[in-house]
Amino acid sequence: MVTGFLTVVVVWCLLYGRMPMMILLPLCLGLGAALPLLGRHGSGQFLTIDVLAQTSRLNRVSPLLKFWTVLVLMVLCVSATSPAVGLFLTVLMLILTVCGGGLALHDYIHLLALPLSFLLLGGLALLLEVTAQKTGVLGVPVFGFWLCVSQAAQTRAMLVMGRALGSLSCLYMLSLTTPMSDLIGVLRRIRCPEVLIDLMYLIYRYIFILLSMYHAMRDAAASRLGFVDYRTGMRTTGNLYFGLLFRSYRQASRNFDAMESRCFDSGIRFLEDAGKMKKAHGLASAVLILMTLGLSILFW
Amino acid sequence: MKYTRAEKNVLALSCMFAVFLMSEKTVHAMHIMEGYLPLAHCAVWDAVCLPFLAAGLIRIRKTLNQNRRLLILLAMSGAFVFVISSLKIPSVTGSCSHMTGTGLAAILFGPMVAGVLAVIVLIFQALLLAHGGLTTLGANTFSMGIIGPVLTWLLYMAGRKLKMNRKASVFLAAAMGDLLTYCVTSLQLAAAYPDQTGGMAASAVRFLGVFAPTQLPLAVVEGLLTVLIVIGMEQFAEPELREISFLEAK
């Protein structure tokens, strides 16, 4: 709801004076309404992205290929000098993740809405300037000052938001189609230090242990009025975090004993059954990159 | 001064905005989001982080050669930092906010190791929660994983040298580290997007102002929670803490 409202205001400020009112008004309202209408309300799951990545149809595509493609596309998107590249990538990645990966559109929009609200606030901060007199294309008086939107600010905000939206979509495309263990495998393949890889594997696995531990402890605390007012809430939170750390350290000690009793000496290896590189996939990603490159040169 | 009806509406709207800016979604306030910085800035921040991370990794490898058990403890701590930095904590403004948790890691393991844990946590946050991003990884690592923990550690060490009250020094160290993180984030944004009329300084003031209402109380909360955790650990988890050499001074 808030995001929808923000969208209307920001799009209005962005495009005001750049197109006829007859087009601008429906565009603003349409985009604003699209978010709350299409989004799905709180599935309540904590690491939704991880769950969706495991079930994506694209998770058999070679993670190495996806990783490099997304990285190159991101660099192209961030270095582009026109918002068109970002918008192109946004649409493309939406199609790829939703149609290619078999993700529900509702889920995608819902996931996008969260970072989007920050993006919109950031865009607003770039758009609005506080001045003594009315300048620029759009001005609003507030307590003796003017909140103004100038043409230069419009151009800059459009560029920044286009870039952010584009690279955010690329990031989502990667994280929504590739399980984390495959991505860590990619990091091993590109020769990241072994210690870092081991740590990442373990941290990723421990996150889930800690989360379930935390939820159990928080529910127990809440059912004993642990969050009844602010003071108690603070103390409970402190105790919860300490209890979590304490129990997790005990758990870590036990885990290590178990590993040592099974002859652990160094290095942790898991079975990697990520997809192999296929010619068609390689070709598709090359086409993607060339299209984006062409677009960014075209709009330089 | 009389307002017309349209002006009144606009006034009400702008007031609503002010409220939104202060209370909405502080979730992402600490991290610079994906694609928000120009490429040159990303590259610079990445480069700045590299020596610190390399030093941290070498340090970790050396410690692990002496004591393998620490690998698991480090991993648990990393997971812990991820979990607490993505959970809501009660916040004064009524909105939800999050700890950074890297101050705690710096107090327990020293700033270099905290930096390595922070970069892993940031990668996971970008991929699993879409907080922060891959292109802005360097900038976020620098503010949250390097400069903040370094200050926290320095203050904590100074407190120990000066024989300050333990609780007070932990609180001060964690809160100041958190504040510095937020200041550096604002400066990074300001450097990338200087004000058209006032230049970088004016822009820095603006970004600081936008974040201040949520980040100032958050620093206090972070300090308090860190104290609670550290004191609790000291009382109940001494063997583990001795292993990570937190209590060696005793």
Image (cartoon, grey):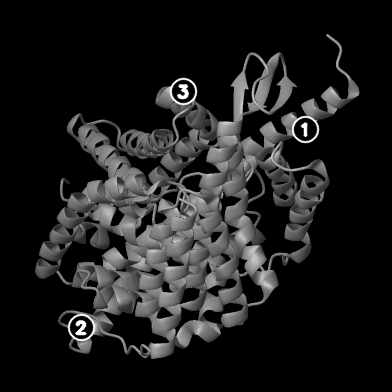
Q: In the displayed structure, would residue B31 be above or below residue B14?
A: below
For badge 1, the amino acid type reads: Leu
Crowd tier of the residue under label 3, counting other residues whose Cα lies within 10 Å: few below 14, some 14–19, many 20 or above: some
Where does residue A63 sit, x and y in percent of width and height? 39, 80
Cα–Cα gap, marks 1 and 3: 25 Å
Whole-angstrom CA distance, mark 3 to mark 2, is 57 Å
Residue at image location 66% in from the left, 54% down from the top: A225
Q: Chain of mark 1?
A: B
Label 3: element kind:
helix
Query: For the residues carrying marks 3 and 2, which lies nearer the camera in this image?
Result: 3
Q: Which mark is residue B13?
A: 1
Q: Foreground: A291 or B23?
A: A291
Q: Does residue B77 sit above or below A48 in this rendering?
A: above
Label 1 with label 2: CB-CB less than 8 Å: no
Seen at 71% across and 13% down, the residue is A144
Q: Quadrant of residue B157?
A: top left
Residue A241 in sight from this viewpoint: yes
Residue B2, image x, y percentages: 86, 12
Name the kind of residue labelled 2 in the image.
Glu
In terms of image quadrants, where is residue A224? bottom right
